[in-house]
């Protein structure tokens, strides 16, 4: 099948690879323009572009799909379908109508739950036990199209945004290959409007830990914000006063305590236990500002925390 692929970040790469391995003819790969990165602000290609060039696929990087010339170029590719996964642009109505079978979107949630930009992180934050992948027939709304195919995925108590991302990327790659094989036989199912929730884009200030929350909720925050933007707190120890401490992993313990939120209940060479509004948080991997990430044993060889806030 002649396919146009549109995607940008790492999440999209496994899907592109799966389409190639399935024998589809990728006639064009659309992704975001190269952006400046790093301290040197060097123009850097996105992961999808890098992958596409390795397969000698034609790469197109328009700033917008609203331009008539861009739309004419896309139409001339004469594709049967356009597969869209984390592209980063809204597709105008004119583009949605160009391919024979329209545009299919791969969304990392069980729609209509968690429409929007950060469905993986919001699912973990909310304590969801299950998520999944939806293959959606795109329309002009934000993740509002009918569902053609769905696959579910359990969220474990140790899943981070990164681990769940990897599982869903693999699941999405399998799902789109299956959907394309059965495209003519799939029945679109409209989304239930009464069950809609939105996964708003992450903000850095959400990463600051509020120790009056429960240990369970703080642990969800830590897992949801790993690898970005990383949960953090102000820390005081025997050797410094108020430095930023990033917490990459922890375990919630539902035990009672007499400490105040953020108080260090215990810190020895083996563990660091922090009082929360409900329960205790056992720190596992931390990173002091300007230092590398360490497991709590190695960190404890250098510092003894006295308070977090």
Image (cartoon, rainbow, N blue to C red):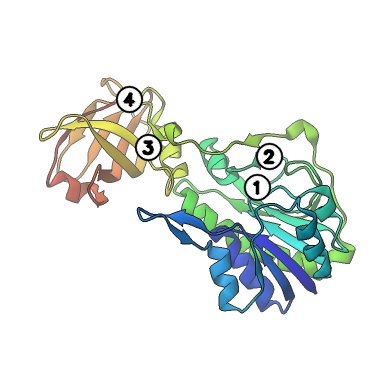
According to the picture, the residue beneath numbered tag 4 turns out to be 256
Q: Secondary structure at mark 3?
A: strand
Give the mark nearest the N terminus, 3 or 2.
2
Give the mark nearest the N terminus, 1 or 4.
1
- The location of residue 193, given as percent across then percent down, is 79, 34
- The location of residue 255, given as percent across then percent down, is 34, 29
Is 44 drawn above or below residue 282 in the view shown? below
- The location of residue 103, given as percent across then percent down, is 79, 57
Give the mark nearest the N terminus, 4 or 2.
2
Q: Residue at x 53, y 43 (%)?
A: 121
Q: CA distance from mark 1 to mark 3?
A: 25 Å
Give the mark nearest the N terminus, 1 or 3.
1
Q: CA distance from mark 2 to mark 1?
A: 7 Å
Q: CA distance from mark 4 to mark 3?
A: 12 Å
Q: Secondary structure at mark 1?
A: loop
Q: Residue at x 78, y 65 (%)?
A: 73
Residue closest to the far front: 69
Q: CA distance from mark 1 to mark 4?
A: 35 Å
Q: Residue 252 got which mark? A: 3
Are dots 1 and 3 in contact, CB under 8 Å?
Answer: no
Image check: 26 left or right of 95? left
Q: Nearer the viewer, mark 1 or mark 3?
A: 1
According to the picture, the residue beneath numbered tag 1 turns out to be 109
According to the picture, the residue beneath numbered tag 2 turns out to be 113
């Amino acid at each position: 099948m002649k396919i146009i692929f549109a995607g940008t970040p790492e999440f999209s790469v496994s899907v592109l690879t799966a389409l190639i391995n399935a024998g589809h003819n990728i006639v064009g790969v659309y992704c975001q323009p190269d952006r400046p990165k790093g301290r040197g602000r060097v123009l850097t290609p996105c992961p999808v572009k890098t992958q596409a060039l390795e397969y000698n696929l034609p790469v197109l990087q328009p700033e917008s799909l609203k331009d008539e010339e861009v739309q004419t170029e896309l139409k001339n590719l004469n594709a049967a379908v356009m597969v869209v996964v984390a592209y980063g642009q809204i597709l105008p109505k004119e583009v949605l109508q160009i391919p024979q079978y329209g545009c299919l979107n791969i969304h990392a949630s069980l729609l209509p739950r968690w429409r929007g930009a950060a469905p993986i992180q919001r699912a973990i934050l909310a304590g969801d036990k299950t998520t999944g992948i939806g293959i959606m027939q795109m329309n002009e709304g934000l993740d509002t199209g009918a569902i053609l195919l769905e696959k579910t995925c359990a969220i474990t108590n140790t899943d981070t945004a990164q681990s769940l991302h990897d599982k869903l990327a693999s699941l999405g790659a399998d799902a789109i290959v299956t959907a394309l094989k059965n495209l003519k036989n799939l029945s679109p199912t409209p989304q239930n409007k009464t069950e809609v929730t939105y996964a708003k884009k992450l903000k850095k200030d959400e990463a600051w830990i509020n120790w009056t929350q429960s240990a369970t909720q703080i642990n969800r925050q830590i897992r949801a914000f790993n690898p970005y933007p990383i949960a953090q707190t102000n820390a005081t120890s025997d050797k410094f006063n108020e430095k930023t401490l990033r917490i990459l992993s922890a375990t919630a313990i539902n035990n009672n305590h007499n400490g105040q939120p953020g108080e260090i209940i215990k810190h020895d060479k083996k563990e660091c236990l922090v009082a929360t509004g409900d329960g205790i948080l056992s720190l596992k991997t931390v990173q002091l500002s300007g230092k590398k990430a360490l497991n709590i044993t190695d960190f404890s060889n250098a510092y003894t925390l006295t308070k977090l806030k």
